[in-house]
Image (cartoon, coloured by chain):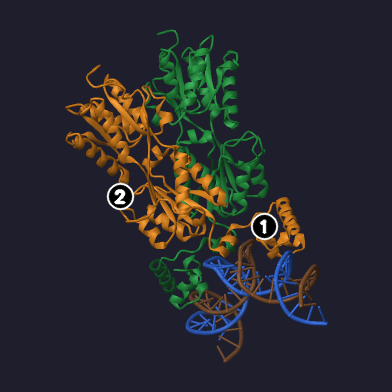
Chain colours: A orange, B green, C brown, D blue
Amino acid sequence: MKGIRQLAEHLHISIGTVSRALNGKPDVNQETRRRVLAAAEELGYVANQSGRSLRQGETKVIGLMIESSKETVENADNFFLGVTSGLQSVFARHKLDLIMLPCPSDEDPHEYLKRMVARRIVDAMIISDTRRVDRRIDFLSRAKIPFVALGRSLSASNFPWIDLDFEGVADHAVERLITLGHRRIAITAPSSEANLGYLFIDSYRRALERHDIPFDPSLVIRVKSSEQGGYQAAHELLLLEERPTAVILIYELMAIGLYRRLMESGVMPGRDLAVIGFRDAPRARFLQPSLSCFRISLYDLGVALGRMLLANMPAYRDFHPGGERNIIWPLELMPGESDAFRVGVMA
Amino acid sequence: MKGIRQLAEHLHISIGTVSRALNGKPDVNQETRRRVLAAAEELGYVANQSGRSLRQGETKVIGLMIESSKETVENADNFFLGVTSGLQSVFARHKLDLIMLPCPSDEDPHEYLKRMVARRIVDAMIISDTRRVDRRIDFLSRAKIPFVALGRSLSASNFPWIDLDFEGVADHAVERLITLGHRRIAITAPSSEANLGYLFIDSYRRALERHDIPFDPSLVIRVKSSEQGGYQAAHELLLLEERPTAVILIYELMAIGLYRRLMESGVMPGRDLAVIGFRDAPRARFLQPSLSCFRISLYDLGVALGRMLLANMPAYRDFHPGGERNIIWPLELMPGESDAFRVGVMA
DNA sequence: CATACAGTCGTAAACGTTTACGGAGTGCGT
DNA sequence: ACGCACTCCGTAAACGTTTACGACTGTATG
């Protein structure tokens, strides 16, 4: 099957009518439409996207840009795939397809994005891993390409984004640990320039100060968000002269390495050191001890992202009216064994 | 910047010349080309992909289809992102872009693939998670769409694929465990219909029989390839009347749940039960006990996949001559603590 | 001096769609 | 008999490129 022309010839009708029939336009006879659809099905005809989008000026494809930097590869995990299903459930209703655009690690994300957008491969964009200052946001705003960002940024004052509630997590975690008697609480932060690190630490600092606990920079451990990073974090914790009694992890799989390094020194997580983690709670439940973890529903997050994006696309705005332009995505604590003790009680 | 026409007008030359200059065609004056390139850079012109691919009949885009089924989401992990970097390093040299096509979980993979291919969004395909019988392979072969599969299949007799050396892994693992004194060796298999499970078990069975150990179906544990699946696998192992002394895991993160369940019953992995795993060795090293793991270089695998694909694309064949049409991808054992004991010695 | 040829560029067709426009046919009321 | 509204369909232009072809120079060759 070559194109709509062959299909039209096969049916002995004009190509215009075939197109209208396939696209559900009103002015076509019921019977004709039936025949066209049947023939298309039979011959396996599907409209060539290049021709269509050239004519219409839109591609019906949404891009989800992800960075395959070394660090992201190590911890991206099921994160994006989880979000993807939520996104697709929203897009499917509008016959929009979602593709993932992995930015090569040796290419500047901003250049990559520009290329993809300029080539008109997608109509709209979802970007992630936003930097503190992120040129992509200015670019997309200026170019008037609909987009949403997964992650806040200082770059533009007003653009649509959803971000995880890092502040809430840090705050909640600190409060909880303090209630359990902890006063010396360490925290891990990513070594990258992603914005989330700053927010996480800031909120941690504020929560501490609310309880008159002075902020100690040596308790902020900058390591990679991976098993290896967890191992290294534990290593650094053990070297501190005054050892903390609790640690907050920014990524749950770090607990694997952390646990190991601790045990190598005879320190038992969940008894000698409290641990609280972040993100994938189902997984955290199976650690030993199970990790107290702030859970996030990736599917729902995807749905929200999709809705917000459509609200910013003129062609779909009516289906997804208003809604907030920014969302701080809440997380839910799933208590585990890793912090289930009071300081000084067992010691 | 609208299109090539505006660019041409701005330069006071014809649109044909502009196109030739940009595309490096020979019959254009050095000085003219310089001016065109400069103007394009300045005005930020990038060719509209729809127009280009409509004319040329190719999109310069390669699709990597991944399934976001529940199970894949849970264990896909960094696997695809790792492969992706290898693929991109190959494609970059030919100005090909890679996009990931996540098949929605509620859509038939075959239908999804057909849609994507018919819409001409991509020139070629890399498919993964091949089924034992996989209609996608017949379809792509018949439609003459260049493709490679990550995973064998029984579907077509002769198509390009690369597959992990499941047989080698199972074989090697069994041999190793037998050398260490084990006679009763369990193994996990995915509950899905992916082909890898069959190969894995088949080879395991053959290796056993080579040593005159009868195959015991109750030692094949069908669980999900996730932490949860590992937990359940351990649970089932503990219920067996004659408990095995070793287990082979098809996915390394299963060890988390497995370890936990074992310890809950006072069984120490690496002392009371030997464990060997599969795939991501850096991560496995940080488990406690560290997991003996068959390592796989995702980047190199991506490079090989990319090369094989290009060898099957007429336009690029000359750059990537011959090469094997099928590759069994070797894996390397990284010994850990999880199987470092001899049966009966410590008991 | 005629011819050939290389170098450079403009012209226009083609790729596969969608869609504005208008025309053919029908039924109905005047 | 005529106009009108309505339904359905065909025609052709347009989207932004690439590229075959031919035209036009200037230079070398016979």
Secondary-structure class at tag 1: helix
Q: Is residue A261 above or below residue D13?
A: above
Between disc 1 and disc 2, the foreground one is 1
Q: Is residue B152 left or right of residue A187?
A: right
Quadrant that contains the C terminus of chain B: top left
What label does residue B260 carry, if any? Answer: none
Identity of the amino acid at label 2? Arg
As rendered, which of B182 and C7 lies closer to the eye?
Answer: B182
D20 vs D7, left or right, is: left
Of the 4 image quadrants, the one containing the N terminus of chain B is bottom left
Identified at 38% across, 21% down, the residue is B289
CA gap between label 1 and label 2 equals: 46 Å
For residue B303, say whether it is visible. no
Disc 1 crowd rating (10 Å Cα; few below 14, some 14-19, many 20+) is: some
Label disc, if present, on residue A132 of the rendered structure: 2
> Do we see residue A34 in this rendering?
yes
Q: Chain of mark 2?
A: A
The relative height of residue A287 versus residue D14 in the rendered view (above or below) is above
Residue shown at 56%/17% (left/top)?
Answer: B219
Please identify the quarter of the rendering in which residue A207 is found. Answer: top left
The x and y percentages for residue B83 are 47, 41
**Rendering coords of residue A41 (x, y %):** 71, 51
Q: Any mark on residue A22, and which?
A: 1
Secondary structure type for disc 2: loop
The three-letter code of the residue at mark 1 reads Leu
Picture mark count: 2
Circle nearer the N terminus (1, 2): 1
